[in-house]
């Protein structure tokens, strides 16, 4: 079922001093009046790719509405892989909350059962939802996410983070052979939060590369991509893996069912 294009403002949070832009989103929902549980989808540094269309369809089949957020084109970018800082993580966190507020305003969405799922750079953003910066504040009574799923995020950015607890249950999925964002960093992050009695559900998929849920099988080397884990600071391998995607879908289905159930 084709998605419906919608627009809504990015969220207002205390330490983002710019006027929130109007974002583009692609909304899909099951048949019927609802209200439905929903999942916000946050793309990676290449913008919205084919994997999000697959996930929207997958979610719809399981009774979830979904909203893919385009946080780049409204700001004048198609991709930021070669220059990651041109759209800040603070802005992307604000985009996620703007999408949440939009969904909460709809009569066909159950605002008490909304999750956010991010991929790569979008995965880093959703870590910022689950592990919020103490400086980020939102208006009292604003809707909250009730589950967070991060696909192959850069977990180094959260090592040593001061946040004492997770704001929402967090699932992280990453491939063991990812050379763009390392599984070892996510394992260190999970151990750090486990020591604070706020466990992260970390799933390391054997043999999987970055972007393993790409519906196109095969590998591709991105020579210009910024990569903090490369000696040169550039270059990363991506590759779709149907078996890893199937396993990840099973994990995500169980997680969402448990965290968004009535």
Image (cartoon, rainbow, N blue to C red):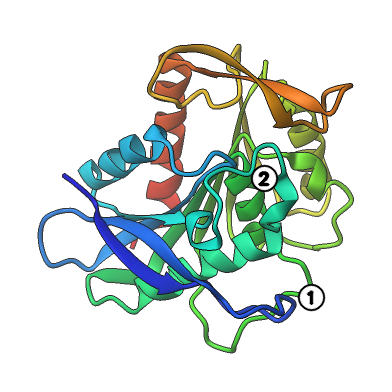
Question: Whole-percent x and y of residue 64?
Answer: 28, 53
Question: Callout 1: helix, strand or loop?
Answer: loop
Image coordinates for residue 187, horizontal then vertical, percent: 76, 32
Q: Nearer the viewer, residue 76 or 192?
A: 76
Q: Residue furthest front?
A: 76
- Disc 2 marks which residue? 200
Return the residue nearer the eye: 151 or 204: 151
Residue that extends furthest to the left in the rendered view of this protein: 32
Eyeballing the image, is 190 above or below 63? Answer: above
Q: Can see residue 190?
A: yes
Q: Quadrant of residue 29?
A: bottom left
Residue at 49% across / 55% down in the picture? Answer: 73
Q: Nearer the viewer, residue 6 or 115?
A: 6
Which residue is rendered at x = 60% and y = 25% of the image?
210
Locate the N terminus by quadrant.
top left
Q: Is residue 17 above or below residue 157?
A: below
Q: Is residue 19 left or right of residue 17?
A: left
**Secondary structure beneath label 2:** loop
Distance from the alpha carbon under mark 2 to that under mark 1: 22 Å
Mark yes or no: residue 261 visible.
no
Rendered location of residue 133, percent (x, y): 76, 67
> What residue sits right under mark 1 in the picture?
135
**Relative to 243, is 33 above or below?**
below
């Amino acid at each position: 079922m084709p998605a419906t294009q919608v627009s809504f403002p990015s969220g207002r949070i205390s330490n983002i001093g710019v006027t929130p832009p109007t974002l583009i989103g692609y909304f899909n929902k099951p048949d019927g009046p609802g209200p439905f549980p929903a999942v916000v989808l946050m793309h990676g540094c290449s913008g919205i790719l084919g994997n999000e269309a697959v996930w929207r369809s997958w979610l719809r089949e399981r009774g979830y509405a979904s909203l893919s957020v385009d946080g780049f084109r409204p700001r004048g970018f198609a991709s930021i892989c070669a220059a990651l800082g041109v759209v800040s993580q603070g802005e992307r966190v604000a985009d996620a909350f703007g999408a949440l507020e939009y969904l909460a305003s709809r009569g066909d969405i159950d605002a008490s059962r909304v999750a956010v799922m991010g991929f790569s750079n979008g995965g880093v953003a959703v870590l910022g939802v689950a592990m919020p910066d103490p400086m980020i504040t939102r208006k009292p009574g604003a809707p909250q996410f009730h589950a967070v799923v991060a696909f192959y995020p850069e977990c180094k950015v959260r090592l040593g983070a001061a946040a004492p607890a997770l704001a929402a249950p967090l699932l992280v999925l990453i491939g063991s052979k990812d050379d763009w964002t390392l599984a070892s960093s996510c394992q260190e992050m999970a151990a750090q939060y486990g020591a604070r009695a706020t466990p992260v559900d970390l799933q390391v998929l054997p043999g999987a590369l970055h972007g393993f849920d790409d519906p196109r099988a095969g590998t591709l080397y991105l020579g210009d991509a910024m990569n903090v884990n490369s000696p040169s600071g550039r270059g990363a391998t991506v590759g779709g893996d149907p078996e890893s995607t199937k396993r990840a879908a099973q994990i995500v289905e169980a997680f969402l069912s448990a965290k968004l159930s009535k």
